[in-house]
Amino acid sequence: MPYIGKTTDGFGVRNRFVYLASASDTSVSGADANGATLTFTDGAYVDVYLNGVLLKSGTDYNTNTANTIAGISSMAANDEVTVVVYDVFTVADTVSATSGGTFSGNVTHSGTVTVDDTTDSTSTTTGSIQTDGGVGIAKDLVVGDDILLKSDDGAIQFGADGEITLTHRHNDGLILKHTGTGSGSRPALAFHAGETEITSGDVLGKIEFQAPDEASGTDAVLIGAEIRAVAEDTFSASNNETRLEFRTGNSESATTKMSIDGDGNVGIGTTSPDDHLTVEGFIRLNAQAGDANYIRFDNTDNSGNIWRIGPGVYSHTTFSIYNQTDNSQVVNIESVNDQLMFRSMTQISLADDATAIAVANSFQGIVVVTSSSNALTGIYRCEGQNTPTLISGTSSFTNSDTDGKFCLISAGGSSNVTFRNRFGATYGFKIAAFGVLS
């Protein structure tokens, strides 16, 4: 009759081990002929058979060494030793259905495990399932509610090598990092729209900024700012035209205030810029203390000049058009006694009796000639094909080609005006013309 254990709360357990001896062996232990490893907890409850004959404990063998049958008379090769171990399986090795229990060893389960308890987890020591160590999961993990990372600087790793990390920065936010150190090791955050047909106006992705918990409510909890990508046309195999919109709110849910279209054109106040920069509304430029405040136009790629337009180019009290390439000031507009003064500031140098230079073609208006070398100024009125009239200036100025004079003349009786220096030496001049083309 099988042994049922030493206690009344147990169930009988019997294990059989078979060994084939080698010549002169006197003991058996470890793995048997079937690969099972001999173990027993109480040597008094072990039966040993040698070639089918039951041996007597203490006389024919002993169990003084743990998990070993020793003291057998020297055996011949292939003698068969059978060891039958009787043990007890008690309720101490089970978990109560009502009060639970503790396992100290490893448990392997080939089926599913279902936990019906609904205790919520708010820490590492609460919830339906708790562990003091880590958890390894080979398949997908589906979570029906919140995931809490309850440690500062906690991180989520992505990839087989864990090269992308999303890490908590204490009391601040999150850090997305590529942990690689080689060239090109940079993180990327991609927004992918799952639609299979993108049409004009579809939003491909967006980032919103909002304060939904603001106690004031109403406008305070609306979206304050937003960046989003919007399709400008129906997508196709040859088209993915998209604009980037920058939206801000002012007592409203954020609306588009600036955009960059698919051609790279920037619109401020419009989502349809028709040039590199289109502004609907006013533009304000504020100069820093001590600095000029101007717009710079660089046309050197077209073999042209560099121009500056704005206040502070020539002086901080004038609005100027300035040719930076040859360091000449072309036009200055200055407020003097609440009146505007228009100035041509181009500096030229003319030798005595040099060829006349063109001042204006098909011109009617006022021409001002200043000799910067000797501070002389002449003012002329030009009326179509008539000879210019000197209306102000010293006798150094004339309206005919005269030796010893500064000469503003009509070319061949036409309305084209030229200037010639016949004053007897090389002088520097500044010339301005104000009027209309005839």
Image (cartoon, rainbow, N blue to C red):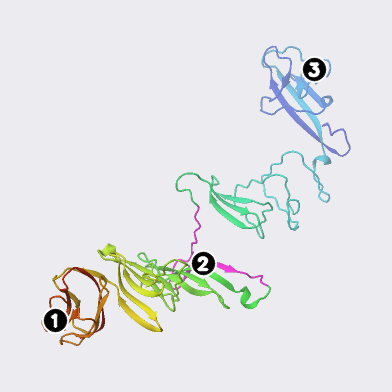
- Disc number at residue 400? 1
The magenta stretch spans which residues? 187-214
Q: Kindly state the secondary structure of the residue where label 3 is placed.
A: loop
Mark 1 element type? loop
105 relative position to 400: left or right: right
Marks 1/2: CA–CA distance: 73 Å
Q: CA distance from mark 3 to mark 2?
A: 82 Å
Q: Residues within 10 Å of mark 1 (few under 14, many from 20)?
A: some
Image location (x, y in percent) of residue 159: 54, 48
| Label 1 vs label 2, nearer the camera | 1
Q: Which residue extends farthest left?
A: 412
In the image, residue 56 lies in the stretch drawn in magenta: no
Cα distance, mark 3 to mark 1? 147 Å
Q: Which residue is mark 3?
A: 61
Query: In which quadrant will I find the N terminus?
Result: top right
Question: Which circle, 3 or 2, is nearer the viewer?
Answer: 2
Give the prevailing secondary structure in the magenta stretch: loop
Residue topped by disc 2: 206
